[in-house]
Every structure is written in C-alpha cells, then in structure tokens.
Image: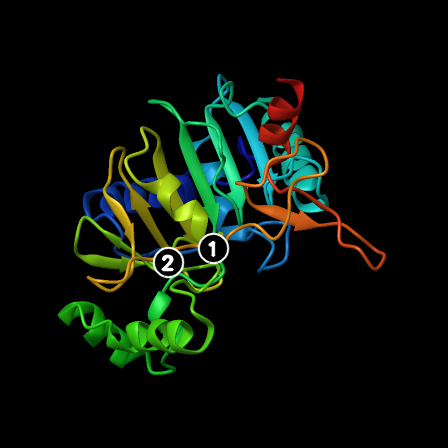
Amino acid sequence: MNYAYLDQPSKREIRRKLLKALCLPGRQVPFSAPELPIAYGWGVGGMAITAALLEPGDRLKVVDHGSDETVNALNIRDFFARTTEVSVTTSTTEATIIQTRQRVPEAALRDGQILVYQVPRPDPLRGFTDDAAEARNRHAQHDYGVVLTTLFEAWLHNGETSLGYDHPVIVEGGALMSPSPVPAMDNMRMNGTEAIQLFGAARERRLYALPAHSRVESLAFRDLPCVPPRPPGACAICGSDKHYVDNIGTGAAPEWVCSDSEACRIRADV
C-alpha cells in the first residue's frame, strides 16, 4: 500500500490540479477522484486532497460540523493515522492540515496551514438550474440573477438576506463559488485568511481552491448586504450568543451548544 493509501500517479494528478486551481481562485477544475474506502457523500473529495498532501511531518486535525468527536471526524482521523502514521491533533493552531465538513474553524488560521473542505455540490448555480450548460454560460458571463432572485424572495417573505448555509460567495470580485455547506456567518472567516483553502467534491469530480489572503464576499445586493441569521440561543457551556450553535435538546425547551467544540472549550476555560 502506498503512503496515505493513494498511489503516486493519483497524488501527482491531484497536486497538479490543485496548483491549477490556486492559479484560478474559485474556479472549478475537473479531476479523477480516486477510490477510497468510504462512501461518496461522506468526504471522499476532502480525503483525496488530504491523502495527496500528507507528509510524515504533518499534524492532522479532522472536524465534522465543528466537532472533533463525531463519527465522521473520528473515522477519517483514525484512517489517516493508520495509513500514514502522521500525528493527529484536536488543536487548530497545532495542525498543519485541517480537514473540515460544514464549518470553518473559529480559531484564526496562520501562514503554512492548509484547510481542506469536504464539498457535496461544487457548483452553486446547480442548486438553481438543472442545466449544466446553462450554469457554465452563466459563470462565463457572471450572470448570477437566479441566485439574486432567490435572495430577494427570502428578504421579501422572511426579512432575511442570506440563505442560512451554503450561501454563495464572490471571489476576488469575480467568480461565484460555493463555500461548501457552512453557515452563512462562516463566510467572513474565509476572507483574507493566511491559510490556503482547498475544496474537493469527489462525486462531481471537481476541486477548487483559494490562495492565502483571497478576497471573499458573500453574494449580496449593492444596497442590501448579506446579514447571517443570529444564533437562536446562548451556548449552555460557554454562554456565547454570538457563535454558531447546534440544538442538542430532547425536551420541550431547546438546549444549545457551540458547534465548534474546540473554540467553545477555550471560551469556557477563559
């Protein structure tokens, strides 16, 4: 078995495509997704990128919905620990490669780190049109009216100017990009970060990337900015009412806790 499970030709192809994606921020690049021992939809795209990049000196962190302890995060972390023997960590600051699903870490990322996203649907326009050719034409012309129409209807009926999660972003004032299904309040954390951000969608055979310090803005109207929904309650552990929370209550009264378990523990200790 090759190091990190993948054979060398697969790794070389993924690395070449990642370099191309970094030269075209936010643009989708086709790649041949290799076979991995996990079902599509559970992170094969992110795992393929991580496997292609891992080296013996790396420290890997895997999070799912912001937590280090979900089934998805535990199994992927264990898989790479067994096949690469790299060090694993639950600390964002200590990690060199962070693989995430449906959250952007709340801790500030630094130069030299790589953030890898698991992406189920790489093209944000495919949620609004079933025609792939039409979606390509709209991207070529920067015609995102179908998304803006949906945003206008959300504002008209609900008074909200965001889609809640997977809210499309504009990269460097041009390309429309899916941030992966992260909460809309996480979009701002993608902007200007010092880490490289890589996105992999194995089922769709697409990857894309953001170099460090990329300008990322949530899609919005000129006179009506994107305002993410406020958290519905305060965290039962750290008491924060400003960060994204999950409902863990089973009774009549909901109980909320921070989705990012590491950041929550740090706030609670402080």
Residue 266 in the image: above or below residue 176:
above
x, y (%) of residue 8? Answer: 43, 37
Where's the N terminus, which quadrant?
Answer: top right
Q: Is residue 207 above or below residue 69?
A: below
At x 56% / y 51%, what residue is drawn? 43
Q: Which residue is mark 2?
A: 178
Work out whether mark 2 precedes mark 1 in sequence or the reverse, and give the earlier one.
1
In terms of image quadrants, where is residue 168? bottom left
**Circle 1 is placed at which residue position?**
119
Distance from label 2 to label 1 (Cα)?
9 Å
> Label 2: how many residues lie within 10 Å, few (<14), some (14-19) or many (20+)?
many
Label 2 with label 1: CB-CB less than 8 Å: yes
Between disc 2 and disc 1, the foreground one is 2
Label 2 is placed on what type of residue?
A: Ser
Please tell me whether residue 69 is drawn above or below residue 87 in the rendered image.
Answer: below
Q: Secondary structure at mark 2?
A: loop
